[in-house]
Image (tube, rainbow, N blue to C red):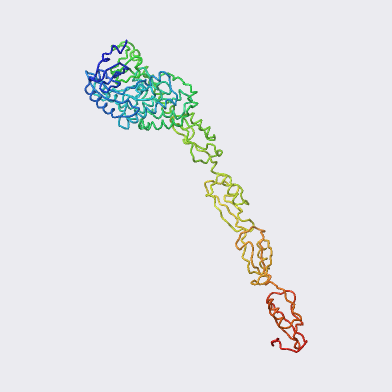
Amino acid sequence: MDMTTSDPLVGATLDRRYFVESRIAGGGMATVYVAHDLRLDRRLALKVMHPSLAQDPSFVQRFINEAHSVAKLSHPNVVQVFDQGEDQGHVFLAMEYVPGRTLRDLLKERGRLTPRQTLNFMAPVLAALGAAHQAGMVHRDVKPENVLLTEDGRVKVADFGLARAVEQSNQGLTRTGTLMGTAAYLAPEQIEKGVADARSDVYAAGIMFYELLTGGQPHTGETPIAIAYQHVNEDVPRPSHFLPGLPPEVDALVTKATERDPRYRPGNAGQYLAKVLEVLRTLPESPSGSQHMTPVAPSGAAGVTMTAPQLIAGGAGPGTENATMVVDMNADDYDDGYGSDDGGGSWFSRNRLLVVGAAAMALLVGVVGWWFLLGRFEPVPDVVGATPEIARDEIRSAGLIYDLSEEPVYSDVSVGEVGATDPEEGERLSPGDPVTVYVSKGPQEVEMPDIAGQNIADALKDLEDLGFETDRIEQEEVESPDNDPGQVISSAPEAGATADREETVTLTVSKGIPVPSLAGEEREDAEATLEDLGLTVEIVEEDSENVDEGQVIDQTPDTGTNVGPGSTVTLTVSTGPPEVEIPDVLGERIKDARETLEDAGFDVKVERILGGRTIGHQSHTGEAPEGTEITITATPGGVVIDPDEDDD
């Protein structure tokens, strides 16, 4: 039947402003039309509430209040609300018209999306929810049907505040024991306590995330109450159970958002968006996993179908399984349809539903108990001794997050291999939890090498290669006539003993033999001193006007220098003042001979024999030190003149 032509609102004008052109969608609480705003001359969407809701004054007032709040929410990923009104018993919202289709339509067409496609859709949805959460609003009905995809590729979230308006009305439909929403996306706290906050939206977003990846919802059942039971009592399985090879980071996003305890979820959609964007940035453009993942079909519905609830409002039948509805959670008046109240038949006949239910419940408790205590957790794989690359692959294959620490640890495995993990191997973690991997820097205790006799620089390098830190190596220098300066004499711990790389290692290092001060010593004494120290002596002679002949003028190396055994020490020994040539003055007159010798630097003594005037003899010839006294003797050959007489 043509719903457009049979709908009495099509062709009508509401509030003397909105001309209803055609019907485009119908749901559990409202019908959506395309309308024309006669006042502003624009096309828009008109959502008209079902008459059962419009008859409740309390709902109408709350709906108006919520509409005002949503109208203030301005965000590019939120369907804008323009107006709200009531006309001829019709309560309506005038909203932005978004031509295109819903995310549900896309999912039905493709079956499922790749991880990157899923993240690209989740990001704008979470951005819209985050803006609402920041403004103090909660959507309460997040699902693919409420995500609109425009023809130009934009993503918009619709129906903000509508669920709250219905849920808080005083209509008899929302009495104690009922809840409002879509069963497949309800958070456990909505079912158990009837409360919803930003974390409830995060849970629903996580369910939608799961559905986009796998193509199916995590919890299914014949009735909404059966599905709700599973949300409360069973964890959402990891998508990788059905998509082997799914990146563990994507797996973790779903796991964290769908924690049954809201304390362990991201606090709001903004926080969840940050995690999604972080994974999206690290996900390869064409990840091999997304190209070769083969979905594994889930093995039937998870959980037990409970007694059928009463559907107070909303659709029924095929195609309405994801409709928003109000569900009565009380089943006291439910008739199971077996037998009659007259007490006839056997006890088993009268109570067979109870027996079957009890058996099923026992089985469920056992399965759920195993899953809660063991099955939902992943053991940390044994990767100690493996390379960091192998450890990364094994940890990620277990659905855990690989976190490589920059700090190495002591371990008995080879340097560079995995030395330890935190938590340790075998401990069970929730999927998506991190495992910190520490690379080995070798064992803490090693055998002390034999470094005695080595130069200190070589010894330090050997110890550093063994993993000892320089600031834990101390040096004690001692004088040693048997070792060269800088040579290691011994170590503590000694060679061959066990050395703890966290403890101090002490090296005894030779200072060698300090050269003594020998300047001014007699040559023989200086030679004896050096020879007693095991040193070799070399003598160099040198004239000196200041140091007596035979005494040490200087030494090489200098005083205090440390040398090794057998090293050569050179002594410079004085030979006294320098010698000069003695002039030959024989035959010269006394006065001339005196001047010649004195000019050459000698002292002159004159002697005369029988008054001689010419030099017939001199006491020194050849060479002699300056200042040497030269005696000259004048022999007879004329008038005897007094030696002190002026001889002109």
Q: Depth check: 124 or 184 in front?
A: 124
Q: Depth check: 451 or 122 in front?
A: 122
Q: Depth check: 128 or 511 in front?
A: 128
Farthest residue in the front direction?
A: 648
Q: Is residue 549 left or right of residue 500?
A: right
Quarter of the image with the N terminus is: top left
The x and y percentages for residue 183 are 34, 21
Quarter of the image with the C terminus is: bottom right
Q: Is residue 590 left or right of residue 294?
A: right
Farthest residue in the right direction?
A: 637
The x and y percentages for residue 514 are 61, 61
Q: Is residue 289 above or below residue 575?
A: above
Quarter location, residue 14: top left
Residue at point 41%, 23% (across, down): 212
Quarter location, residue 249: top left
The x and y percentages for residue 273 are 39, 31
Q: Is residue 281 left or right of residue 5?
A: right
Q: How many marks?
A: 0
The x and y percentages for residue 382 are 51, 32
Q: Is residue 608 above or below residue 339?
A: below
